[in-house]
Image (tube, grey):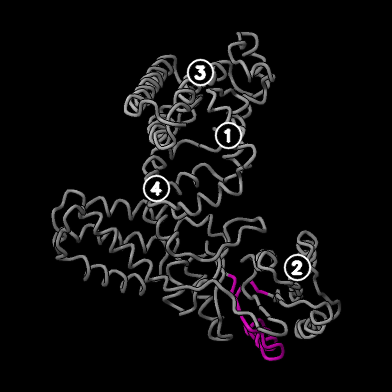
Amino acid sequence: MFDDIQKRLTSAIGKFRPRGLLTEANIQDGLREVRTALLEADVNYKVVQDFMARISEKAVGQQLIKSVRPDQQFVKIVHDELLALMGPTDPSIRFEKSGTTVLMLCGLQGAGKTTTCGKLAKALVAQGRRPILVAADLQRPAAVEQLKVLGQQLEIPVYSETDSNPVKVCQNALVEANRQNRDTIILDTAGRLHIDDELMGELKQIEKKVKPHHVFLVCDSLTGQDAVQSAQAFNEALELDGVILTKLDGDARGGAALSIRQVTGVPIKFVGMGEKLDKLQPFDPQRLVGQMLGMGDIVGLVEAAQGAVDQEEAERQQEKLSKGKFDLNDFRKQIVMIKKMGSVNDLMGKIPGMSQFKEKMEDVDADMEVKRIQGIIDSMTQKERANPNLIDISRRRRIAQGAGVEAADVSGLVKQFDGMAAMVRQISQLSMMDRLKALTGLGQAAAFNPNARLISPKQGTGKRLTPKEKAKLQKQREKDERKARKEVRDQRKQSPGSPE
């Protein structure tokens, strides 16, 4: 997410590292890159102009604070202005103290409006609300059926009618909601491929007759300035209460997120971060700005881990590690947990300081690498996973055939795992704080080093490695392993007798 703008902003900030003072002369190169980054991110031109004027005014001539590098000062300025750009936001929904609260969702076709209705309903149920979904989109084929399917999945009632019109459907839904004692109504209204008078007229009639308490516009963040322009048009017609940005997890630019508030004055309330019904999040500018500046997203990382980690299994793994035990079965469980947390590249983007390693691995399909490793392990027997030393030439060939790789790939995985298991056993004897320090060293030396992948059957060009290149790569791996083991030994020397 936001990979393009992150690279540009990181490059701009890097220009200030050797400086001792932010001056009008040396700041121009950096400002030029920031401006280019925002324009290429499809941020509104007027927004970019105002943004650059504020940054320039704050940055030029600012004295170097003791113990704070110029690039860090510049990061602070850009960070604060990006937050201000998206404005203060309140993702909460004000519900009526008595009676039914009506939420109306509108937007163009293809923005993900119907799915967002389901996501919003699921989020409201988690808050203790009793929502009902209303199928008022009678334009798009199968829209009603799609909403019914979502309702069945969520066990939430869906109100619909045949041979009717959207206004009557919404009006009758109010009566049905009261009959079923539902406290929240979510109206899924019709969209169009473009804004037209018929669409706006229909939405105005629903707003006039039903009087929704909140009107939310659903926008596809991948459309950039088109999303901003549609937000302007809808707001002029309906007076929006908020915007819901969908598909933000696939947005490499971020133009819509950075422009909508400034251009329309309408706050972003929620963002869609995936296709699943639990992937609707409150809009948090702080987290988005952190990712844009390569500062990571610890909150997002923790949330991903909480959703993926089985607490009982984690405790069993910890008990095994405390005894210095670690086999390929355990390694496979770690792989499954990582896959549940999401894309490997996305996870790296959420770890502070890992953006530089992410860039180095651009030619590496990390998710495919994880699948390949899991495939090799899955082709092994339980005995082979528990004791990789059993894997001889014939077993390697059998495993390779089952996993669709070469025997050398299996051998490479086993050799790398031997070193990893030894380091894990050593780390398990350290105190918790020292474990974190050691693992940080291991992560930089091996996990995020493109030359230290567990298996590396292909280069970025797609060609097989030559024997000479393989030998060179193996030497590099062994060097990385020695370095990592030395770091672990040093940690142990510094913390003799540390408690578990």
Q: Which residues are magenta?
A: 191-218
Regarding mark 1 in the picture, which secondary structure is present there?
helix
Dot label at residue 334: 1
Instruction: Answer with the quarter of the image where residue 197 lies.
Output: bottom right
**The image quarter in which residue 376 lies:** top right
**Dot 1 alpha-carbon crowd within 10 angstroms: few under 14, some 14 to 19, many 20 or more:** some
How far apart are labels 4 and 1 at the CA level? 21 Å
Question: Which disc is residue 143 wearing?
Answer: 2
Q: Nearer the viewer, residue 19 or 337?
A: 337
Q: Which residue is mark 4?
A: 352
> What kind of residue is marked 2?
Ala
Residue 195 in sight in this render: no
Look at the numbered discs 4 and 3 and tell me whether their residues touch, using CB distance below 8 Å. no
From the viewer's side, name the closer residue of 431 and 47.
Answer: 431
Rounded to the nearest whole Å, what is the CA distance between mark 3 and mark 1?
Answer: 16 Å
**Is there CB contact under 8 Å for labels 1 and 2?**
no
Q: Are marks 3 and 1 in contact (CB under 8 Å)?
A: no
Q: Confirm or deny contact between disc 2 and disc 3 (CB under 8 A).
A: no
Q: Is residue 223 visible?
A: yes
CA distance for labels 4 and 3: 29 Å
Where does label 3 land, which residue? Answer: 418
Q: Nearer the viewer, mark 1 or mark 2?
A: 1
